[in-house]
Image (cartoon, helix red, strand yellow):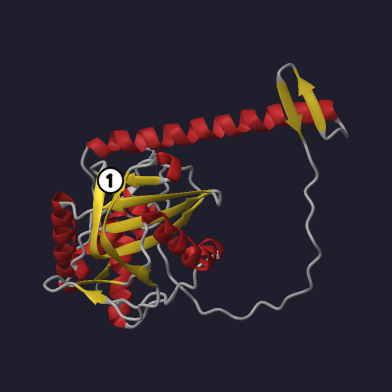
């Protein structure tokens, strides 16, 4: 395993799902901002987490097992360079390049092998093997953000006729999905990469459509605090509905608190109670002792809030 070797200042295989709107972790705008920060030299590097660390640890094991199931003996996991697309501003890093000898692999659920788009795929010449680890339950069609788009990008950059995606689900079930280049997906990736590159070079930045409050704060990060904006009449109803929903939530929270208190009073010092078909637990929460800490000084920062506040203007 070599790790990421692609350029942080352009589209790469790992961010293709995000810029196409198929990542559960990053919006297209967050991804665009990351790359813009790298171009500006102001990016904060992400060191990963426990999930990504386990993925790195298990990667060689998954690749070896995938190669065994596919009958591939000639493969390389030490690829320390990026594969660059011949015409697009796109490059990818590979977990593994493997060489098929023309063997035909058929879908076999009992062996955890699934050919995508057909019952059989012939492994002719070099191909890519990508490894993933997930806590999700096993699938027969992997989510687009869990490897298929990244693998298609790898096939595009490497000129491969086949690729395999090895996914370990919940630490107990491994499945190998075999793909061939998919013309419609190749076109969608091509369009997304060209559009992403144009956005990187536009001035002012041409953001994607805003998807959530965090996105809104990212895109509209230079607030004008002088002049109020008069919104269209339709937003009067939206503001009213906002306040009604907040009041409904507050009433619900008050009711929950009151019911919870009544149950606690009845339970007394018991940590477990039974009410008909319902089991009620009221456990102790314990924390470990920690030494006194001196918090280091932090510079002043400015960041737009992710929530809005609305109040009715009394006339």
Quadrant of the rendered image containing residue 190: bottom left
Is 208 placed left or right of 24 in the picture? left
Instruction: Answer above or below: position of 126 versus 65.
Output: below
Instruction: Answer above or below: position of 251 versus 289.
Output: above
Direction right: furthest residue: 269
Quadrant of the rendered image containing residue 132: bottom left
Q: Nearer the viewer, residue 68 or 141?
A: 68
Residue occupying the point 51% across, 79% down? 299
Q: Position of residue 129 (x, y in %)?
A: 35, 62
Q: Nearer the viewer, residue 51 or 213?
A: 51
Direction top: furthest residue: 276
Q: Position of residue 253 (x, y in %)?
A: 59, 34
In the rendered view of the protein, which quadrant contains the N terminus?
A: bottom left
Q: Position of residue 63 (x, y in %)?
A: 43, 63
Q: Alpha-carbon neighbours of circle 1 within 10 Å: few (<14), some, or many (≥20)?
A: some
Q: Nearer the viewer, residue 234 or 298?
A: 298
Is 136 placed left or right of 270 in the picture? left
């Amino acid at each position: 395993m070599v790790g990421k070797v692609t350029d942080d200042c352009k589209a790469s295989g790992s961010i293709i799902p995000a810029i196409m709107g198929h990542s559960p972790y990053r919006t297209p705008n967050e991804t665009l901002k990351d790359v813009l920060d790298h171009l500006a030299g102001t990016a904060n590097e992400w060191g990963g987490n426990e999930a990504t660390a386990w993925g790195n640890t298990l990667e060689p094991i998954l690749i070896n097992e995938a190669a065994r199931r596919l009958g591939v003996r000639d493969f390389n996991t030490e690829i320390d360079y990026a594969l660059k697309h011949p015409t697009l501003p796109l490059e990818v890093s590979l977990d593994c390049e493997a060489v098929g000898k023309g063997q035909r692999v058929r879908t076999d659920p009992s062996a955890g092998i699934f050919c995508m788009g057909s019952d059989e795929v012939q492994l002719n010449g070099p191909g890519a093997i990508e490894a993933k680890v997930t806590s999700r339950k096993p699938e027969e069609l992997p989510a687009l953000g869990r490897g298929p788009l990244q693998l298609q990008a790898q096939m595009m950059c490497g000129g491969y006729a086949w690729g395999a995606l090895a996914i370990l689900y919940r630490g107990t079930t491994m499945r190998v999905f075999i793909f061939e280049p998919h013309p419609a997906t190749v076109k969608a990736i091509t369009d997304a990469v060209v559009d992403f590159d144009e956005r990187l070079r536009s001035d002012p930045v041409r953001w994607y459509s805003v998807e959530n409050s965090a996105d809104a704060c990212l895109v509209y990060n230079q607030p004008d605090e002088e002049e109020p904006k008069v919104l269209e009449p339709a937003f009067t109803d939206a503001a009213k509905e906002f306040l009604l929903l907040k009041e409904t939530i507050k009433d619900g929270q008050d009711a929950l608190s009151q019911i919870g208190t009544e149950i606690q009073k009845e339970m007394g010092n018991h940590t477990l109670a039974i009410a008909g078909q319902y089991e009620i637990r009221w456990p102790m929460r314990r924390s470990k002792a920690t030494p006194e800490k001196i918090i280091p000084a932090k510079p002043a920062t400015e960041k737009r809030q992710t929530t809005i506040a609305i109040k009715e203007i009394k006339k």
